[in-house]
Amino acid sequence: MKAYQIWSRFLLSLLAVLVAAACGAGGSQPQPQTAPADASPASASPSAAADQGATKTEPAYPVRQIEYIVPYSAGGGVDLVARAAADYLSKEWGQPIAVINKPGGGGTVGAEYALKQAKPDGYTVLAVNVSNTSMLAAGMAEPLIKNDDQIYTARIGKGTMAFAVKEDAAWSDFASFSEWARANPDALTWTSVGPAGFSAFGVAEWLDRIGGDYVKTRMIVTKGASDSVPKVAGGHAVLAIHTVGEINPMLQAKKVKVLAVGGEERSPFLPDVPTAAEQGIEGLSVFWWTGVSFPKGTPEGVIKKWEAAVAKMTSDPDFVKKLHDIQVEPAYADSAQFTQDVEKETQYYTELAEKTGIRN
């Protein structure tokens, strides 16, 4: 009996020790933390801060090669400016920029590739100019490329319109040539990348001012100035209307001559050639320009970076000299101003196209 009592006491003591140990272990477990009464949800949870609008870091750009699409043949004004810009910006950013020529369709083949087929990631940029933007939209009722298809990012340069004929052509001045064109519209042939190109609007505006018949003249389609001016030099067309820079190689080779330039002032690159206004034909306002655009959906950071880079580039004396070497003047415009100018131009050219018969 005595042994039984001793054993029972031992078991009770052991049970008490085990219970005490269990209680001690439970008391040492960490308790749930309660946020201070004045703590905000963001301070209570880092992920909540990200969900409530914390700014994410913009990805680096560019980190690889950029395709600079020129929708005309090599050697023309758009191409030459694009190559100068690509060279400058590739050094500025430390990434290659490849100029790729995709001519055809009056500039629409390359534009469609850059704006509708390529990804809107900033790695495909389009060399736009007046022919495949405001003039295209004005000249065609259903253009393949519209102003709304792109983000006008920055304008780079501009050029003066020049009227060129074969070097040994009978006309010695623009006034006499204009009289001939008014009297002989059926015999007037002229070159253009398409029915809504720069040359087409230059011809239409000129004929409208002198009372000529645009519809009776004949357009000869080319791939650009490098194809167009040689056709005039070879006698396959009477007139080429391009920028001073685009005509200059054939002018220097004495294959063509320039009868007049458009605008209110003489070109700084052809100071001896009178304006059309000086020869009694006023109101020729068509001028050439080129810049860059991206497809809709391109990140805003890409647009801003190009905008700033082009602004810097067109203020750089070395780049300006390169433009002058190809007879192009710097004419920077940021995205907002560029877009506004294109819209204004489109309205003017649409009215001209409807009046003269360009629009179809």
Image (spheres, rainbow, N blue to C red):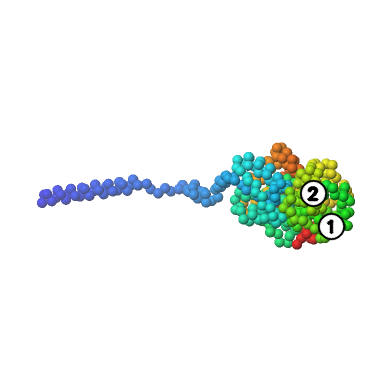
**Residue 144, x across and y down, in percent:** 68, 59
Q: Is residue 318 left or right of residue 204?
A: left
Residue closest to the eye, 219 or 14? 219
Residue 151's label in the rendered image is none
Q: Residues within 10 Å of mark 1 (few under 14, many from 20)?
A: some
Q: Is residue 152 visible?
A: no
Amino acid type at circle 2 is Ala
Location of residue 349 by image quarter: bottom right
Q: Residue furthest top?
A: 317
Q: Which is more toward the observer, 182 or 5?
A: 182
Characterize the local packing of mark 2: few (<14), some (14-19) or many (20 or more) Cα atoms within 10 angstroms. many
Q: SS at mark 1?
A: helix
Q: Measuring 85% from the left and 45% from the top, which residue is drawn there?
A: 274
Disc 1 marks which residue?
187
| Residue under the image location 63 percent in, 42 percent down | 90
Where is residue 300 shown, x and y percent of the image?
Answer: 62, 49
Q: Position of residue 343 (x, y in %)?
A: 73, 54
**Residue position marked by numbered label 2 in the rendering:** 233
Residue at image position (87%, 57%) is 184
* Residue situated in front as seen by the camera: 320 or 79: 79
Outermost residue toward the left in this view: 1
Q: Is residue 16 visible?
A: yes
Extreme front residue here?
234
Q: Earlier in the sequence, mark 2 or mark 1?
A: 1
The kind of secondary structure element at disc 2 is helix
Q: Is residue 305 left or right of residue 4?
A: right
* Quadrant occupied by the C terminus: bottom right
Residue at image position (73%, 60%) is 140
- Measured in 3D between alpha carbons, the distance from the residue under mark 2 to the one under mark 1, in whole angstroms, is 17 Å
Q: Position of residue 162 (x, y in %)?
A: 80, 48
